[in-house]
Image (tube, helix red, strand yellow):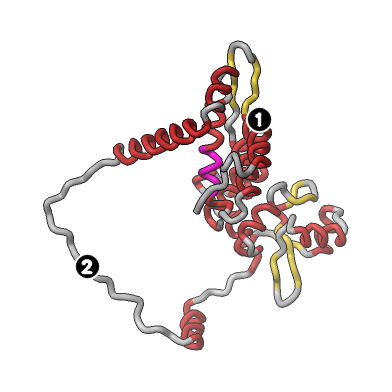
Amino acid sequence: MSLNLDISDNPHYVDDIGKETIMVAAVRKPAVETQINVGSAAIADILDVLARHNPGIPRAALKERSKVVAAVAAAAVQLSDEQQRHILARKKMLTETMETVIDRLADKGRQELIRFEDDKPAEVSEGEGLGDLLDEAEGRRRLAAIAVPVRLEDWAGPVAGPGEIERIFGTRRSTLHEWQKRGAVIGLLKGERKHVFPLAQFVDGRPIAGMGDVARVIGNPRAAWQWLIQPKPSIGGTPLDQLKAGRTSEVIDAAERDFG
């Protein structure tokens, strides 16, 4: 897998990095002090650039690379104009130097690992295996014997159909249908054809920002809603509550880690 960062072969990409990546810097006192913004929003912009110019690489694989680019850009904009001109006049040397620095940083990370020595022989164990392969009919029979029927409302929380949504929030059915068509709201199939909508995804009659992005990442509406309402310690609560708090990018990142 190669990342498209070739300066000579991709001038448009250089323009994008120049305009979008270097915009990571917000200069408050140009002559004295430079304040660099490498927050999640800036990194997301860089990720968009990398994804656009490297369509063959999965977006999830580019996430860490975007953080590296942001860190390098943050360091680069602190250089003086003279230093930048000096570096750009020696592009080949810059590439070789960056490769050396990255290799050293990677080696340092490996050296910090704890080495554990043990003179005792390794214990060899063997599990029982998966057992005999069952046919579909027998598998369904065994599953039915232990499965407990659960109403949709018991795990999804309060839900309502289009008519109830219109009465509760004043949202027209056509508007709700359009939201569902665009993926902005999550509709759960109840029965064979009827869709109902978890009420917790609405604030003031409108879907919470970010719902559509999460649904697109996860793909399945039922799995998406289950994920949204389950506590997730890594982001400080349920993804749904974090969306309501405005932490959209953190929730989308978490969804991509779990389902990307």
105 on left or right of 74: left
Instruction: Give the residue number, with chain letter if any, for mark 2.
Output: 125
Give the residue displayed 58% in from the left and 49% down from the top: 238
The region drawn magenta spans 62-68
Say what secondary structure mark 1 lies in: helix
Q: Is residue 67 magenta?
A: yes
**Structural crowding at the residue carrying mark 2, measured as other residues with C-alpha within 10 Å and reported as few (<14), some (14–19) or many (≥20):** few
Q: Nearer the viewer, residue 234 or 114?
A: 114
- Residue 109 lies in the magenta-colored region: no
Question: Please, which residue is most extreme toward the top here?
Answer: 32
Disc 1 crowd, CA 10 A, few/some/many (<14, 14-19, 20+): some
Left or right: residue 179 compared with residue 112 = right
Residue 159 lies, in percent from the top left, at 71, 61
Secondary-structure class at tag 2: loop
Q: Judge by depth and name the residue closer to the eye, 149 or 9.
A: 9
Of 11 and 52, which appears nearest the observer? 11
Q: Position of residue 111 (x, y in %)?
A: 29, 38
The amino acid on which the numbered mark 1 sits, given as a three-letter code, is Met
Q: Is residue 139 above or below residue 181?
A: below
Q: In which quadrant is the C terminus drawn?
A: bottom right
Q: Nearer the viewer, mark 1 or mark 2?
A: 1
- Residue at x-position 53% and y-position 74%: 148
Residue 131 drawn at (x, y percent): 34, 80
In-image side of 59 versus 176 (left or right): left
Give whichever of 25, 144 is nearer the camera. 25
Q: Looking at the picture, does residue 102 appear above or below residue 224?
A: above
> Residue 225 in the image: x percent, y percent?
63, 59
Distance, label 1 to label 2, CA atoms, is 56 Å
Q: Earlier in the sequence, mark 1 or mark 2?
A: 1
Residue under label 1, please give it. 23
SS assignment for the magenta stretch, majority? helix
Kind of residue at disc 2: Ser
